[in-house]
Amino acid sequence: MVEFRILRAVRRVHRKLTTLDFRRADFGLFRDLLGRIPWDKAPEGRGAQDSWLIFKGRLLQAQEQCIPTKRKSGKNTQRPAWMNKELLGKVKQKKEAYRGWKQGQVAWEEYRETVRAARDQVRKAKALIEISLARDDKDNKKSFYRYVSDKRRTRENVGPLQNETGDLVTQDMEKAEVLKDFFASVFTSKCLSHTAQAS
């Protein structure tokens, strides 16, 4: 008989994603470390898989020594330009009020007032930042164009789709055909149902 216990800590773990910082990398040392390895003798008498593992291990060791890491910053981690400490507090209050309303601890009117106050402050902050960007666009063109490009950023790629036979489609023309067939079938079935009801 095997007896075991699973101990679980009840706390939230905030994951911090890191990425390689190539701007601060020492590529001279990296080249030197990889150049010292006797590549003709290291994989000698080994298969392809073992040789690859040796190469990968040495490469990762050199990478650890020469290329520092930094916290990953992306669209999800950066605050908008108009978000300040006061607005963060208001948004937090709104979330807490919503949670309280769902649990029956906060009245609907109180929750609605909190939401309206937060929404108004966010709108005012957005308007103020846009006015200041428009006013200072000649002196500070970089921030103006960065703000505009953030607004215009769209998702250009559509993921793989499944066609009628169940196969995954990855080519753009094939995806277009799948979408065209899908929408055509949806609209024709609706039209047929409407004509059937009308007659």
Image (cartoon, helix red, strand yellow):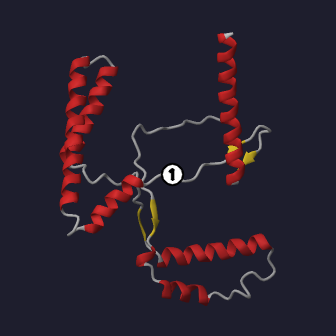
Q: Amino acid at mark 1?
A: Arg
Residue 98 at x, y percent in the picture? 31, 27
Residue 192: image quadrant is: top right
Residue 61 at x, y percent in the picture? 55, 75
Residue under the point 21% across and 49% down: 84
Vertical order, 129 against 162 (above or below) = below
Residue 137 at x, y percent in the picture? 23, 64
Vertical order, 60 against 5 (above or below) = below
Mark 1 lies on residue? 155
Q: Looking at this view, is 53 or 184 the one in front?
A: 184
Q: Looking at this view, is 101 or 118 the one in front?
A: 118
- Could you tell me which secondary element the residue under label 1 belongs to? loop
Quarter of the C terminus within the rendering: top right
Is 165 left or right of 123, judged from the image as shown? right
The crowding category of the residue bearing disc 1, from other C-alpha atoms within 10 Å (few below 14, some 14 to 19, many at least 20), is few
Residue under the point 25% across and 30% down: 115
Residue under the point 26% across and 37% down: 92
